[in-house]
Image (cartoon, rainbow, N blue to C red):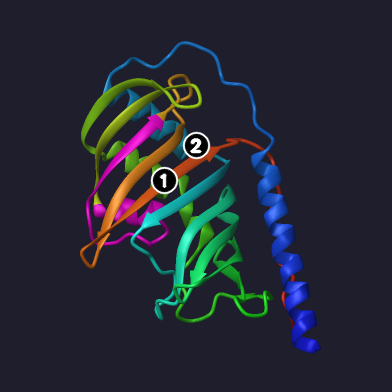
């Protein structure tokens, strides 16, 4: 009976986190208007690096397909998607959709405030400090100054593909992200490889709205799609309830 109550309480906590993230993603705003950035890759990336480095809050969704990527050293929890929100300087909360042991799909809640990370237990649903053997810090999916600014400023072989319609007019730029930079913006899920990447950048604000890239691990390819929005929205990230 006690385990059942703990599981129910944990599910409610994760459900509250899910609701908060979803509501944050529904606030939306009209497309900013103004003079577009010059249609040249260096000018766009310079402006984008500056704009992304100054971000104070954002909603993010990261989706994985094809080869699995695990968030634990036991290779039991394969990540399918992350839906979360970030607030400067280093707070984030996210809902992780994972596949357990190649069969059962479930949702985990993750909260990070400063240097502390909590993860909901995949069995009980109760939040607890990040256990040994798990490597997932939702605040690392969006590090404005240490992650996104150098990612864009140091992009290698950049090419302006063109101006395309992707939920509005966007500049599409392709290039190669150095291994150290892609490791930071993937919260350590991608390591030890330079990665070809495409960005879709708002032509007025310079903010990145989408990114896509493919990584390789043990000879298998993994596809990633990152969506960003609700820049500058106000939301509060609080520590979860933790069982004594």
The residue shown at (72%, 75%) is 242
State the SS at label 2: loop
x and y percentages locating residue 78 in the rendered image:
44, 68
191 magenta-colored: yes
Return the residue at label 1. Answer: 225
x and y percentages locating residue 31 in the rendered image:
57, 21
Magenta region: which residues?
Answer: 179-200
Callout 2 crowding tier (Cα within 10 Å): few <14, some 14–19, many ≥20: some
x and y percentages locating residue 22 in the rendered image:
67, 47
**Above/below status of 90 relative to 132:** above
The N terminus: image quadrant: bottom right
x and y percentages locating residue 228 in the rendered image:
51, 39
The C terminus: image quadrant: bottom right
Return the residue at label 2. Answer: 54
Q: Please indicate, yes or no, whether residue 203 appears anywhere in the rendered image.
A: yes
**Above/below status of 239 relative to 122:** above
The residue shown at (53%, 80%) is 131
* Disc number for residue 172: none
Looking at the image, the residue that sits furthest to the bottom is: 1
The residue shown at (76%, 80%) is 6
Quarter of the image for residue 189 reads bottom left
Callout 1 crowding tier (Cα within 10 Å): few <14, some 14–19, many ≥20: some
Q: Nearer the viewer, residue 13 or 147?
A: 13
Quarter of the image for residue 39 reads top left
Looking at the image, the residue that sits furthest to the front is: 103
């Amino acid at each position: 009976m006690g385990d059942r109550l703990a599981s129910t309480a944990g599910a409610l906590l994760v459900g509250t986190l899910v609701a908060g993230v979803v509501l944050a993603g529904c606030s939306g705003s009209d497309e900013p208007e103004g003079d577009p950035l010059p249609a040249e890759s260096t000018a766009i990336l310079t402006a984008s690096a500056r704009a992304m480095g100054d971000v104070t809050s954002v909603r993010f969704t990261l989706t994985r397909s094809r080869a699995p990527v695990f968030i634990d050293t036991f290779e039991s929890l394969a990540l399918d998607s992350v839906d979360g929100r970030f607030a400067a300087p280093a707070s984030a909360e996210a809902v992780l959709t994972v596949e357990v042991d190649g069969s059962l799909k479930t949702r985990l809640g993750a909260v990070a405030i400063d240097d502390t990370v909590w993860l909901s237990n995949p069995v009980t649903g109760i939040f607890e400090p990040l256990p040994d053997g798990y490597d997932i810090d939702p605040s690392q999916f969006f590090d404005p100054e240490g992650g996104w600014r150098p990612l864009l400023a140091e992009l290698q072989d950049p090419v302006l593909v063109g101006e395309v319609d992707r939920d509005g007019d966007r500049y599409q730029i392709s290039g190669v992200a150095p291994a150290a930079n892609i490791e930071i913006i993937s919260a350590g899920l991608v390591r030890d490889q330079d990665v070809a990447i495409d960005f879709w950048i708002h032509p007025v604000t310079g903010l990145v709205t989408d990114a896509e890239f493919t990584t390789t691990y043990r000879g298998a390819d993994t596809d990633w799609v990152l969506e960003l929005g609700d820049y500058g929205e106000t939301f509060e990230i609080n520590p979860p309830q933790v069982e004594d």
